[in-house]
Image: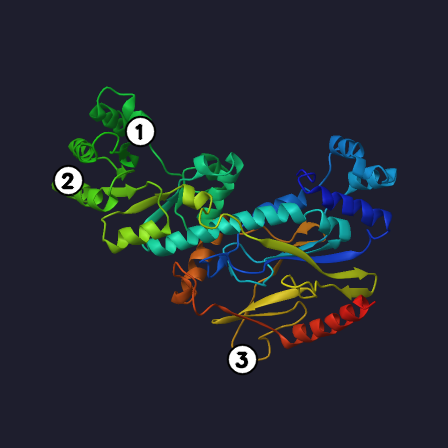
Amino acid sequence: MNALLTDLYQLTMAAGYFEAGKIQETATFELFVRRLPLNRNFLVCAGLAQAVEYLLNFRFRPEEIAWLRTLPQFANASPAFFDYLAQLRFTGDLFAMPEGTPVFPGEPLLTVRAPLVEAQIPETYLLSTIAFQTLIATKAARIVEIAGQKAVVEFGTRRAHSPQAGVLAGRAAYIGGCVGTSNTLAGMQFGIPVFGTAAHSWVQTFAHELEAFRSLQQLLGPNTVYLIDTYDTLEGARRAAQLGKPMWGVRIDSGNLVEMSRAVRRILDHAGLKEAKIMATSDLNEYKIAELLAAKAPIDAFGVGTDLATSADVPSLSAVYKIVELRQGEERRYTAKLSEGKRTLAGAKQVFRFSDHDIVGSSWECVGCKGGPPAEALLQPVILNGALVQPLPEIQSSRQRSLDSVHRLPRSLRTLFESKEPWRVEYSEELLALNARVQRSLEQEAKP
C-alpha cells in the first residue's frame, strides 16, 4: 500500500518527530465526527476494510523516498530519517466499530494506538476512506429505509467523483442496505450482487425495438430487464409483453413515473405477466422515492445513481482525527484541544451502547458491567501489534448489521429530516473528571 498517499504535512511532522527524538513515543488518535450533517440523525460506519488493508500494507517504496529527498521541505532532514522511512511499518493497534454500526457525534469510529509517526501519517488515508464510505452507507440506509420492502440498487459509478470512488460507493451502498450495485469491479472484489442489462443504445442499434428486445431475451432469459422508454414507454411495454416469459421485468427511466408505472402495470397484467416487475430509475433519491410510494406507484425496485454515489444533498462528511494521549515509557500525558468550537476530550475512549442511549467512557471502564441494563462495547480490537487479530466479517454480515441496527433505532431517527429527539449520547463521570483535570492543567500551562 502506498504510504505516500497522504498530505505533505504528515510527512514534515514525521521528519520533525524523528529529529526531535519523539519516534519512540506511543500516541493514541481517535477518528470521529463532531456533528451530524444536514437531515442526518445517525451515520452508518463503513470503510474499515480499506483502513485495515492500508495499515497492514503500510510502507514507502524506494522511488518514493528518493522523490521526498528532492523536496525543499526536507532539505534539513538527516539521512537517517529517510533510512527510517524505508523500514517503517505499522506495528501498532487499531480498535474500531464494526462496519454497519450506527454512530453519533463525539463517538470514535476507530482508535489508532501506535508509535507516534506510525499513528500520524495514516490520518489522511483513514479520514478519506472512512468518511467517504460512511457518508455513502448512510445515504443508502436512508434510501433503503424509505423504500421499505422495495429493492434498491446502486447505479452511480458513471456519476461518481472518480472510477475508484464508484467502486467504493458500490461497496458502501451495499453495507447501507442496497441489494447490489451495477459496478462489476465492486461485485468481483467484494462479493456484491451485480445488476443491469442494457441501455438505450442497445435499442437504438437495432432497426426495430421488438428485435432489440427479442435479442436481449435470447441472451439473458429470466434475467431480462427491458428498458422500455427509448421511444414510447407504453408501446415499449406492449412489445415486452408480446414476447412474454422468460423475463425479470421492465425498467422506466423517464416521464411521470407514477402514471407510467400504473399504465405499464396494467399492460403487463393484461398479458398474464403479473409476476413481471417494474424498476424505476431517473435521478431518484430518498425524497422522490417517498413521493412515489405515497402515490402508491406500482414500482417493485429502484435504481439510484447520482444522488447515492455522491450523497448529493450532503456531499462531504467532516470527520476528524485527533490525538488524545501520549505515552513515553511509563509516563502518560493526556492531550486535548481547548479552542472554541473545536474542543476535544482527552484520553482513549470506549462507546457503550444501551437500547436507548450511548455512554462514551474511558477505555479502561466497564460501563454496564455492574448490574443494570446490558450494554455493548462498540470499539473492538482489529489489529494488535501490527497483526490482524481475526478476519473481518464478510460484507454480507456488515450489511445485515446495518439493516438490523438501523431498524432498531427509534422511528423518529429514521425520518428524512432532523429529529427533534436526537439519540442520547452521554459521557461517563470518570471521563468527565479526567477531562476536568486535563483542562485545568492545560489552562495553567497556557498562562503567560
Task: Residue under label 1, please give it.
Answer: 200
Which is more foreground, mark 1 or mark 3?
A: 1
Ranked by sequence position, the earlier of labels 3 and 2 is 2
The outermost residue toward the left is 270
Quadrant where the C terminus is found in the figure: bottom right
Mark 2 Cα shell of 10 Å, populated few (<14), some (14-19), many (≥20): many
Residues under labels 3 and 2: Cα distance?
59 Å
Q: Is residue 236 above or below residue 175?
A: above
170 and 340: which one is in front?
340
Name the amino acid, label 1. Answer: His
Residues under labels 1 and 3: Cα distance?
60 Å
Q: Secondary structure at mark 2?
A: helix
Residue 267's mark?
Answer: 2
Residue 393's mark?
Answer: none
Name the colour scheme: rainbow
Q: Could you tell me residue 174's position as x and y percent? A: 44, 47
Ranked by sequence position, the earlier of labels 1 and 2 is 1
Q: Could you tell me residue 241's position as x and y percent? A: 17, 35
The outermost residue toward the bottom is 371
Task: Residue under label 3, please give it.
Answer: 372
